[in-house]
Amino acid sequence: MSGWYRQTPVGDNLIRVSEPHVHALLAANLWWLRGTDRDIVIDSGLGVVALRDEIPAMFERDPMVVLTHSHLDHAGGAHEFRERAAHATEAPTLAAGPPASLYGAELYQKMGIPDDEPAPELLIDELPHNDYDPRGYRVEPAPLTRLLDDQDRIDLGGRTLTVLHLPGHSPGSIALLEEHTGVLFSGDVIYDDDELIDFLPDSSIPSYRQSMKLLAGLAVSVVHPGHDHSFDQARLHQLATNYLERTN
C-alpha cells in the first residue's frame, strides 16, 4: 500500500477520506457514510490510486458511490463501484470519462479554465510508487446505474439523505442533506472560501445565485464540503450571502 489516502473519523459512522499529496486545486474530500443496511461514499477522489487496494474495508458492504458532480477530483475512482449515482445532467460526462490531467496547463486547456495565472506544473507532490507515470493518468468511464434529481431520497437504513439539485458550479451539481440531523454534504456547490468556481465553460452565475438563495436560508447543523474543512450554519449563510452580494 502507498498510504495515498488519509482517513479521519468524523463521528456518527462517518469517515472523511482525503488525498494529502494532491495540489489544493484538486484535493477533494470523500465522505464514507455507514448506514444500518448499507454504506454510501460521496465522491471518489482523483483515482490516482485504487480505493479498493488502499481501503478494502470501504467495499465490504458493496457501497454505492454518489457523485456530487462529474469533475475529475470527485469522479476519479467512481468506476470502482458497482453502483454509481449522480444527477442525470452529469451522466454523459461520466460515461465518457471526464477531462483529466495531472499537469496544470494541460488540465486548464482540457477543462476550459482561464489561464489568468500560471498553472501548477504537476498537481501531485509525491508519486504513489516509484514507477508511476503521471502522463498516463486518466479518469475511467463510469456509466451511472442510478439517475438522481432534486428531492430524491437515498435510504441507508437508519438514515436517509435528500438530494438537493444546486446547479451553478456545474449543471448537475448536487448536495445531500440528512434532514433529521441537519448534516449537509455540499460537494463543490459551497465550501469555506469566498472565491467559488463559477467560471468554467458549463458554470452559470444565474443558476449559482438561485442555489445560493436556497442555501442562505437552509437550516443545517454542519456542512461537510467537497474541499477543505467542515463548517457551521452561520458560515454557510455568510458564504451564500457574500456570493449573492458579490454577483448582484
Image (spheres, rainbow, N blue to C red):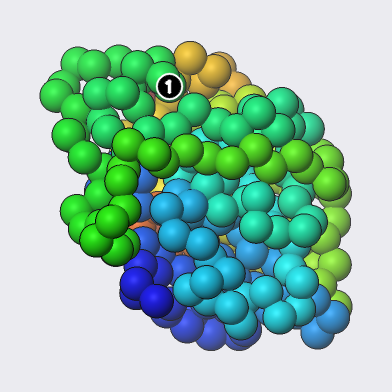
Q: Position of residue 71 (x, y in %)?
A: 52, 36
- Point 84% across, 46% down: residue: 146
Mark 1: few, some, or many residues within 10 Å (few <14, many ≥20)? some
Q: Position of residue 203 (x, y in %)?
A: 51, 21
The quarter in which the N terminus is drawn is: bottom left
- Image position of 193 with respect to 212: above or below: below
Left or right, residue 234 beside residue 133: right
The image quarter in which residue 96 lies: top right
Asked whether residue 242 appears in the rendered view, the answer is no
- Point 52% across, 40% down: residue: 139
The image quarter in which residue 155 lies: bottom right
- Point 65% across, 50% down: residue: 79
Q: Which residue is mark 1?
A: 111
- Point 35% across, 27% down: residue: 107
Q: Position of residue 36 (x, y in %)?
A: 81, 84
- Image position of 236 with respect to 243: above or below: below
Check disc 1 and report its element: helix, strand or loop.
Answer: helix
Q: Amino acid at mark 1?
A: Met
Q: Nearer the viewer, residue 45 or 106?
A: 106
- Image position of 113 with respect to 35: above or below: above
